[in-house]
Image (cartoon, rainbow, N blue to C red):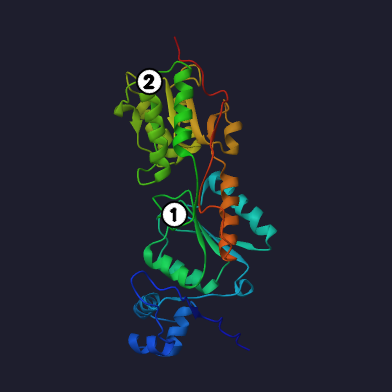
Amino acid sequence: MTPPEPVETRTTTPAAGRSAQTATLAEIAREAGVSAPTVSKVLNGRADVAPATRSRVEELLRAHGYRRRRAEASRSPLIDLVFHELESAWALEVIRGVENVARGAGLSVVLSESAGRLTPGRTWADQVAARRPHGVILVLSGLDESQRALLTSRSIPFVVMDPAGDPGVDVPSIGATNWQGGLAATRHLIELGHTRIGAITGPSRMMCSRARVDGYRAALETAGLPVDPALIATGDFHHEAGYRQGLELLRRPDRPTAVFALNDLQALGLYEAARELGLRIPEDLSVVGFDDLPVARWVGPPLTSVRQPLTEMAEAAARLVLDLGREEAPVATRVELATSLVVRSSTAPPPA
């Protein structure tokens, strides 16, 4: 027997400057030039609707203030966790945090990857709407306007963790104090006596990377040290960038005596570049990473790193998305967890 379609209702709060709409589904169907069952399929996230038709109906549903409201029990026992790239121990820490909360709530976690894109494709949004999960967590990613409208119309809550760009004032997000972390990393090197401090950044389009670089700059300027653009190399948060850009920095005749790699993976690539050039860490070169992944404790020498509380951030994102799914007002919808510097053996005063 085919299960009954979940009930749809419309919100009663009118949009700003416009009276509340009273159109029925049949009237919306006539306005869209489709049948009422087609409108119902769009509302229920069915996949068997042409994209152009779906877009037209979605626009009319938004204009008339329709919003799907389902009892929590009618949702699938899932949390959708979306990465722009699913690799490295960084992702494992996030998965662990979401799993911790999901397990306690009797939910499973569905993983997906947007292949390096900062916004998942439209097919993904349709699949999520059809799954009807308890909520969606996007990591270093985001949604375009049509995707946000689609999930909102299905009452599927979403939270962005470590947003790549400004998620918007109305989008719940969980992040970390990236600027403060960049400041602490660079200040530590300055206090050791370093004056030529390089940096290997992440992608400039990512807000966390820009914030860490700004913290690095602020520490240098506060100490009265010049910010040398030649010592700032653009990376991409991968091992290879740390290795490649590390070679460029360390082959300079006026090479830096310390480098702040804006994540641990690039710091490990920098380790290999230093080894290849015969430089010892920390005797010849001090290195600071960011994230404090488990591997940071076991490399030789153990890596000084800014701890980003990834597991705790993921747990906070999962709790927030569940609160939103229960239509409970959260304490805050934009949260930043504190970073902290963990000093190990990869940093020391510069060589005489």
- Image x and y of residue 315, in percent: 60, 51
Badge 1, how many Cα within 10 Å: few under 14, some, many 20+?
many
The N terminus lies in quadrant: bottom right
The single residue placed furthest to the left in the displayed view is 229
Q: Is residue 204 visible?
A: yes
- Image x and y of residue 83, in percent: 49, 54
The C terminus lies in quadrant: top left
For the point 38% across and 68% down, the residue is 146
Q: Mark 1 belongs to which amino acid?
A: Ser
In front of the other: 255 or 134? 134
Q: Is residue 298 above or below residue 175?
A: above
Q: How many marks?
A: 2
Q: Is residue 345 left or right of residue 118?
A: right
Return the residue at label 2.
Answer: 196
Q: Mark 2 belongs to which amino acid?
A: Arg
Q: Earlier in the sequence, mark 1 or mark 2?
A: 1
- Image x and y of residue 78, in percent: 60, 65
Say which element carries label 2.
Answer: loop
Q: Is residue 138 above or below residue 341?
A: below
The single residue placed furthest to the top in the displayed view is 352
Say which element carries label 1.
Answer: loop
Q: Which mark is residue 204?
A: none
Q: Is residue 91 above or below residue 64?
A: above
Q: Is residue 246 visible?
A: no
- Image x and y of residue 85, in percent: 47, 52
Return the residue at label 1.
Answer: 141
In front of the other: 85 or 152? 152
Spatial distance from mark 1 to mark 2, Cα to Cα?
A: 34 Å
Residue 123, located in which quarter of the rendered image?
bottom left
Badge 2, how many Cα within 10 Å: few under 14, some, many 20+?
many
For the point 36% across and 81% down, the residue is 53
